[in-house]
Image: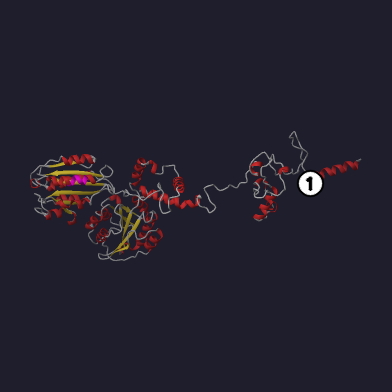
């Protein structure tokens, strides 16, 4: 009896030691486990899994058995740590699953649907083909191109022309390499492409040594441009910045008429020549902005300000490259784009709309029309811009002086007609172009018809000009010049160019040097217009050209079409 009990007890321990499943426990009561006992592993099959449903028959011809779901995979890799070849793995999976045709099962569809699980593999969408055409990956370059075209059409990429004027003289020998690095950092913030940003470079030293080493727009990509900048030479010699500025003002080949031309002058401000005339010529380049940058610790700020004509355009230090990029790319085109979006909401991509969606729509529309040829754009595709791109350089203060003295009785209306046409072409507004008007005759007959602070509209200015009366009397031009100088000085604003248009015959009763000097000290460019019945007849050419910034800033009244080209216009603003 004792031997039978011992044998039974030994068999019981043997069964438990081999980890057999305990008997079913309908009451869900945990069985007693002695200390140190390792409970058996639960089955790998999920709840509801019935092994009787797995057949070992051959799949129906023409149908492929789906891969096994991840929770049924039990491969040699899991048990031994060694991976099986892909073909063997698939073979093991196919041995476990058969896909029926659905006949007699009461459920139509594949075995995946019948068993209630998915294989994890997804079929290609209907729009995608076996060769990959129509897939999102292959559409990506087209989508990016469409986005670039959209940016070009609206002008939000702010395309610009940039010319670097680089001092390569002995005084900057220690920082010349830093100047090159500065230029490269600025270029790194630009978008060097044929239809976006173009860059040129002028290197100078002495009076006769200015070289255009990189023509504007010569390099169409970032890599070639960077290589050209690396190869810019150092000249040494005496500093002749004034001559370099003149050289830059007369070498504008390659610039685009409808875009702002940004000059970036890198120098220490110590020039051995007179820079005033060169600086004026450079600032007078139509639709341009001048920046002066100094890299070294020793510099002459007064001369740098004289170059730019604006204190805020003088930048100090090698870390100012970010400011240069920000100002160059901070154009008014984004405002214009917003206005365009409001006017034509259906033609633009709205915030929150994916560009890829818009492109896919165009692509599908084109695909439906079998008559569309590959070389013909879809009807609603992005096309080339028909209007000139908006640019940023519209901030001008333009002064106008009318001579209503007795000598201009017969030609008084000529001044008004030219002035009226000038106002019509300019973008008048408080944040763009402002206009001030002064009229003079006798010593006590100087009147301010409009100042810059009043922000007159274009219609109001036209009405003022139309109703300007004729005074008659002695010609006191100098009084009008000094009054206009005070108007400019009392209403200065940042990043604004100042120009003055003086109508007269040149016969002033007093010297005009005082008034002209007060204007030129502020960086105001003076244009003079000779008013006479016959061209150059009855005009004091010496005074007219002497008052002008340079002889080339004098115009006859019969040549007003060329005169208007030197003033801002809505064609590019």
Mark 1 nearby-residue class (10 Å; few <14, some 14–19, many ≥20): few
Along the horizontal axis of the image, is 77 left or right of 406? Answer: right
Q: Which residues are magenta?
A: 418-423
Residue 204 placed where, x, y %? Answer: 29, 63
Is residue 266 positioned above or below 44 on the image?
Answer: below
Q: Quadrant of the N terminus?
A: top right
* Label tally: 1
Q: Is residue 432 visible?
A: yes
Determine the main secondary structure of the stretch shown in magenta: helix
Is residue 84 positioned above or below 335 on the image?
Answer: below
Along the horizontal axis of the image, is 479 left or right of 94? Answer: left
Considering every residue shown, the one lying at the far front of the view is: 371
Residue 395 placed where, x, y %? Answer: 27, 47
Q: Nearer the viewer, residue 534 or 333?
A: 534
Q: Quadrant of residue 344?
A: top left
Whether residue 211 appears in magenta in the rendering, the answer is: no
Q: Quadrant of residue 230?
A: bottom left
Residue 423 placed where, x, y %? Answer: 21, 45
Residue 180 placed where, x, y %? Answer: 36, 60
Along the horizontal axis of the image, is 91 left or right of 184? Answer: right
Considering every residue shown, the one lying at the far top of the view is: 27
Circle 1 is placed at which residue position? Answer: 18
Identify the residue shown where x is 41% and y is 54%: 375
**Mark 1 secondary-structure assignment:** loop
Whether residue 422 appears in magenta in the rendering, the answer is: yes
Q: Nearer the viewer, residue 369 or 345?
A: 369
């Amino acid at each position: 009896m004792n031997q039978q009990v011992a044998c039974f007890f030994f068999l019981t321990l043997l069964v438990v030691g081999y980890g057999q499943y305990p008997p079913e426990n309908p009451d869900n009561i945990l069985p007693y486990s002695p200390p140190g006992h390792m409970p058996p592993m639960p089955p790998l099959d999920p709840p509801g899994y019935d092994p009787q449903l797995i057949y070992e028959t051959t799949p129906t011809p023409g149908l492929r058995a789906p891969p096994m779901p991840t929770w049924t995979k039990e491969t040699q890799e899991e048990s031994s740590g060694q991976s099986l070849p892909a073909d063997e793995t698939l073979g093991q999976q196919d041995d476990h699953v058969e896909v029926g045709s659905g006949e007699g099962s009461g459920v139509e569809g594949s075995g995946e649907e019948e068993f209630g699980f998915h294989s994890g593999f997804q079929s290609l969408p209907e729009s995608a083909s076996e060769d990959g055409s129509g897939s999102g990956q292959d559409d990506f370059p087209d989508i990016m191109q469409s986005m670039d075209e959209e940016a070009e059409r609206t002008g939000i990429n702010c395309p610009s022309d940039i010319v670097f004027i680089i001092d390569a003289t002995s005084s900057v020998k220690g920082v010349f390499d830093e100047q090159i690095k500065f230029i490269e950092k600025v270029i790194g913030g630009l978008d060097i492409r044929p239809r976006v940003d173009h860059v040129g470079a002028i290197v100078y030293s002495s009076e006769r040594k200015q070289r255009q080493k990189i023509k504007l727009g010569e390099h169409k990509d970032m890599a070639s441009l960077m290589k050209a900048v690396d190869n810019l030479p150092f000249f040494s010699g005496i500093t002749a910045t004034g001559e370099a500025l003149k050289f830059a003002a007369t070498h504008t080949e390659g610039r685009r008429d409808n875009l702002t031309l940004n000059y970036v002058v890198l120098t220490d401000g110590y020039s051995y020549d007179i820079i005033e005339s060169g600086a004026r010529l450079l600032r007078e380049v139509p639709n341009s902005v001048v920046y002066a940058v100094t890299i070294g610790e020793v510099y002459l700020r007064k001369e740098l300000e004289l170059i730019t004509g604006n204190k805020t355009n003088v930048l100090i230090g090698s870390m100012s490259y970010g400011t240069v990029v920000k100002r160059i790319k901070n154009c008014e085109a984004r405002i214009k784009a917003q206005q365009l979006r409001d006017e034509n909401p259906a033609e633009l991509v709205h915030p929150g709309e994916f560009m890829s969606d818009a492109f896919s729509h165009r692509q599908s529309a084109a695909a439906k029309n079998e008559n569309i040829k590959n070389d013909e754009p879809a009807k609603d595709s992005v096309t080339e811009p028909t209007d000139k791109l908006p640019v940023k350089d519209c901030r001008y203060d333009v002064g106008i002086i009318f001579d209503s003295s007795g000598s201009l009785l017969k030609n008084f209306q000529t001044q008004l007609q030219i002035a009226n046409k000038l106002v019509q072409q300019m973008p008048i507004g408080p944040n763009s172009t402002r206009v001030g008007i002064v009229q003079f005759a006798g010593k006590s007959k100087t009147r301010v018809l409009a100042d810059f602070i009043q922000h007159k509209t274009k219609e109001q200015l036209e009405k003022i000009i139309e109703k300007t009366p004729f005074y008659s009397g002695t010609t006191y031009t100098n009084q009008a010049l000094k009054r206009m100088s005070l108007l400019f000085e009392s209403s200065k604003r940042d990043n604004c160019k100042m120009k003055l248009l003086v109508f007269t015959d040149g016969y002033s009763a007093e010297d005009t040097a005082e008034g002209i000097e007060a204007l030129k000290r502020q960086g105001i460019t003076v244009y003079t217009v000779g008013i006479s019945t016959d061209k150059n007849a009855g005009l004091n050419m010496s005074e007219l050209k002497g008052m002008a910034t340079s002889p080339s800033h004098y115009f006859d009244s019969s040549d007003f079409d060329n005169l208007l080209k030197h003033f801002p216009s809505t064609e590019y603003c």
